[in-house]
């Protein structure tokens, strides 16, 4: 292992993280809901969707964030170097996995750990390790 | 605060929360899947930024959830929903592992996927549609199992 000191951005990462923490705080303290993005999206798409309004409002905010950003500055570079076939596979696995596991990086990784939920701590450790192993296999064994 | 007021105000706070979440992701560099993959590549040229994003987010949200547990209701006097399940079952384990594999392939998770769609990124859109297919796959599996 070597640390990429050129691309490592500790201050932006901490500040951006704190803004995400603020977002999560606003949702729990004013709307009374957990900011778990996979769950919010999944439940919004259910035919019997309840609490439609707050879910739609939250996702709308997320979708609009790049527009708001562009009012003040250029968006930072977005690099997706994955080919379309793998991208589709990846998306499908993320969709299936987050519904099965009841959460993703936001719901388990931030909200769950923040309230010291054992379930979320286990889930986060598992998807982190599984992510590390996948990148290791894809980059260093298969060599895509 | 009357319930009429909170019914109007609460969705505005949800909108604000979504906006802040997206801006935080962009500012932190997490709307760039290549940077997320650089975090997951511990054997390569490792970029620890994502761990700092989580630390920053946790520092703020731990306080918020502490307050939420104590208050039991929002500042708009509506109830706070906190999950009550604590069982670590096979579904949680398998689901989280599958999610990690998907995340490790492209470096995209649901939050950044929505930001990429909002930014008009083609590949983000493809990922998003595939994610909805993943949701549908779950529906098929759970229907077949009869739960």
Image (tube, rainbow, N blue to C red):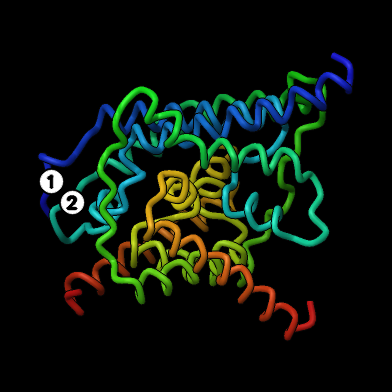
- Asked if residue A127 is positioned above or below residue A118 in the image, the reply reads below
Residue bearing the label numbered 1:
A4
Chain letter of mark 1 equals A
Q: Is residue B147 above or below residue B78?
A: below
Q: Quadrant of the C terminus of chain B?
A: bottom right
Q: Quadrant of residue A130?
A: bottom left
Q: Classify 10 Å Cα crowding around label 2: few (below 14), some (14-19), many (20 and above).
A: many
Between A58 and B41, the one lying in front of the other is A58
User: Looking at the image, is B129 positioned above or below residue B31?
Assistant: below
* Residue under the point 89% across and 16% down: B2
Q: Quadrant of the N terminus of chain B?
A: top right
Left or right side of B86 for B58: left
Mark 1–mark 2 CB contact (< 8 Å): yes
Percent position (x, y) of residue A26?
61, 26
**View extreme (bottom): residue:** B144
Give me the residue at 34% from left, 72% from top.
A84
Horizontal side of B34 relative to B45 (left or right) equals right
Residue A135 lies left or right of residue B87; in this view the side is left
Which residue in the structure is indicated by mark 2?
Answer: B46
Find numbered disc 1 in the image and state the secondary structure of the residue it sits on. loop
Using the rendered view, name the quadrant where residue B57 is placed. top left
Kindly state the secondary structure of the residue where label 2 is placed. strand
């Amino acid at each position: 292992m070597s640390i990429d000191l050129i691309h490592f951005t500790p201050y932006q990462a901490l500040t951006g993280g704190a803004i995400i923490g603020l977002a999560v705080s606003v949702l729990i303290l004013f709307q009374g809901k957990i900011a778990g993005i996979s769950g919010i999206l999944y439940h919004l798409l259910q035919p019997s969707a309840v609490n439609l309004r707050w879910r739609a409002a939250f996702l709308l905010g997320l979708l609009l964030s790049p527009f708001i950003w562009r009012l003040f500055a250029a968006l930072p570079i977005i690099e997706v170097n994955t080919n379309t076939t793998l991208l589709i596979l990846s998306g499908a696995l993320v969709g299936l996995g987050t519904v099965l596991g009841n959460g993703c990086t936001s719901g388990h990784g931030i909200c769950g750990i923040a309230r010291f939920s054992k379930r979320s701590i286990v889930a986060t450790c598992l998807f982190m390790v599984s992510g590390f192993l996948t990148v290791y296999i894809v980059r260093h064994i298969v060599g895509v | 605060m009357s319930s009429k007021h909170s019914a109007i105000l609460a969705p505005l706070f949800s909108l604000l929360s979504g906006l802040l979440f997206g801006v935080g992701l962009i500012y932190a560099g997490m709307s760039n899947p290549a940077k997320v993959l650089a975090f997951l590549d511990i054997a390569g040229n490792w970029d620890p930024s994502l761990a700092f994003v989580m630390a920053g987010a946790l520092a703020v949200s731990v306080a918020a959830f502490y307050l939420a547990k104590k208050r039991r209701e929002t500042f708009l006097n509506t109830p706070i929903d906190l999950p009550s399940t604590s069982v670590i079952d096979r579904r949680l384990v398998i689901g989280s592992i599958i999610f990690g594999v998907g995340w490790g392939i492209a470096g995209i998770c649901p939050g950044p996927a929505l930001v990429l769609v909002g930014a008009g990124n083609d590949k983000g859109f493809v990922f998003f549609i595939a994610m909805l297919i993943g949701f549908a796959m779950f529906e098929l599996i759970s229907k077949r199992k009869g739960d």
